[in-house]
Image: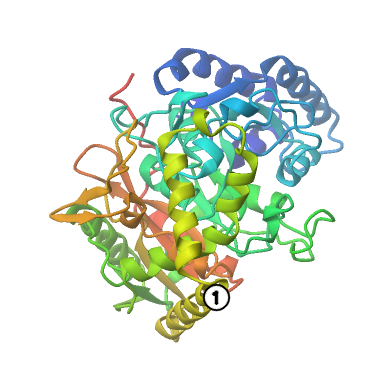
Amino acid sequence: MTELHYLDAVTALQLFRAQKLSPVELLEAVIARTEAVNGQINALTETLFEEALPAAQQAATRYARGRDLTPLLGLPIAAKEKHGLKGRTLSQGLVARRDELAPVDHPVIERIRRAGGIIHTRTTTPEYSCATVTHSPLWGVTRNPWNPQYSPGGSSGGSAAALAAGLAPLATASDIAGSTRLPASFTGTVGYKAPYGRIPGLAPLSADHYRGDGPMARTVADTALLASVMAGRHPGDHTSLPGSHTLFCPPAADAAAAVAGMRLALCIRLGNYPVAPDVEANTRAVASALGAAGAAVEEIELPWTIEEISRTVFTHFGYLLGPTIEDETANSRGLLAAYTQRFMADTRKAAQDNRFVDGIRAETRIQAELAAAMDGFDALICPASAIAALEADGMYLDGIEAGDVHLEHYWQGHMTAPFNITNRCPVLAVPSGMADCGIPTGVQIVGHPFDDATVFTVGAAVEAARPWAARRPTSWR
C-alpha cells in the first residue's frame, strides 16, 4: 500500500472527489514527512504550513459541497524559490538578496493558485540557478535522497529531492540548460521542458528562448496535469502561446500499447558525449522495452560535438544570462559561490570570443541537424546525463572525469543543453534505471517542435513497460 505522503496527484484528486480522502489528511501526512526527513536532505528554503492548512480545510469544504472543483484543488505543491510568491522573499539563492521581496506572484504560481493548488513549501536552488548541483552559501548543501553523498542535480535540485523524499506530490521547476531534466534523472522523478512559449515566464528573461518554467512530479500523468495548468498565454509574457493546452496520458493499462506502430530514434551519445556504461545500459533497456511494446526503434548518430554544443550555449549565455547576473551582483561579488563566479567568467569570455550572430548561426545549424536526424521518426530517445552522478558539495571548477575522459567543464557531462538550443522541441525526462553508484538514471524523450502529446505518450509507455513509481529511496532513512 502506498504511504500517504507518496500518493500521486491524480489518485489524490480522485479520492478527494469521492470523499475518501481529505486534502487536510494529505497535507498533514506531507507535513509530518517533511518534519521527519528534510533535515537529512535540506531540500527546502522555507515551509508555509500555517498558510497551507487553512487552504486545505477550505478545499475540503468545497469537495464536501461538490462545487467550485478546480483542477488542482487541495493538492500540496512545492515551489522552486525562483518562482516568486508576492510579499515573500525572492533571493535567487544570493546572500546579498536574502531580504528582497517578490512584488507579484510568478505566472506559474498565479496559475497554480487559481487552479486550487496549495503552495506549502519552497525549494532550494544554486545561486541564480546557474549550476547543475544544488548548494549555496545561503542555503547550504541539498542532498539526493537515494544517496546523500550525491547531488539531486540542479538547478531544480530542491524540487527533485522533495519529490523523491515524499515531501510533495508536485513541484515547480525551470530549465535553461537542463535544470529540470537533470534533477529528474538523478532522483527517479519526471521533469518536463515544454516548447518555448508553452508555459509563460517572468520578464525580462522570459524573452530568452533557451529558458522555460515547468512541472516536476513522480509520474508522467501528474507531470501532464501540472503542465496543463501552467500552459497558455499570459499578459506578462509576450512570447507565451495562445490557447489552453490540456495534456492527456493514455490510461496505465493501455500506455505501453500506445507506442505500437511508432518509429523512435535512439541516440546514445548525441555525437561524442562520453556516456557511462551503466547510463548506456539503462538507456538501451528503455529502448528495448519500447520495442517490445510495438515501436520500431532505430539507432542513429548525430554530428554534434561536446565542444560545439558548449561553445554555442556559452555564447548564448554570454549575451543574456551572464550579463544579467553581472548586473544584479555588481555590489556583492565577494559573497558569491565560486561556481557563480566561474559561470560569469566563462560567459564573459564566450561573448568576447564570439559575436551574437555567430551563436545564432551555430544554433540554427544544430536545429537543422536535429530536424534531419528526426525526419521519419516520431520522437528521439537519449540519456539525460552522460555521467551518472555529481558530488553533493562539488564545485567542479577544474572540470570532471567522465570515465577515462577529462571534460574541461562539468556541464559537458550533461546531454540536456542541445535541446535548449532546439527549444521549440518538447522534452520529457523519465527514469531509466539505477546507476552503479546507487542513484537513478534517466532518459530524455525529445519530440518534434510543439508536439507535446507524443512525448507524453512515449513517456507513459516507458513508465508502463518499466514501472518505477513504487520504488523509493531507502539508504538515507
Tell me where residue 231 appears, x and y as whole percent. 71, 56
Seen at 36% across and 35% down, the residue is 151
Q: Is residue 104 left or right of residue 52?
A: right
**In the rendered image of this protein, does residue 464 appear above or below residue 80?**
below
Q: Residue 64 sits in which quadrant?
A: top right
In-front residue for pair 432/157: 157
Image quadrant where residue 23 sits: top right
Q: Position of residue 235 (x, y in %)?
A: 85, 56
**Residue closest to the far left:** 404
Residue at position x 53%, y 75% in the image: 448
Is residue 272 in sight in this rendering?
yes
Q: Position of residue 307 (x, y in %)?
A: 33, 67
Q: Amino acid at mark 1?
A: Ile
Left or right: residue 288 versus residue 58 is left
Q: In what element is the residue under mark 1?
A: helix
Looking at this view, is 424 or 229 the one in front? Answer: 424
Of residues 99 and 472, the one nearer the viewer is 99
Residue placed at 51% from the left, 68% from the top?
A: 421
Query: In this figure, which residue is indicated by the disc labeled 1?
Result: 360
| In-image side of 295 versus 320 (left or right) | left
Quadrant of the image containing the C terminus: top left
Q: Position of residue 256 (x, y in %)?
A: 42, 62
* Number of residues whose C-alpha sits closer than 10 Å to that of mark 1, classed few (under 14), some (14–19) or many (20 or more): some
Which one is in front, 459 or 372? 372
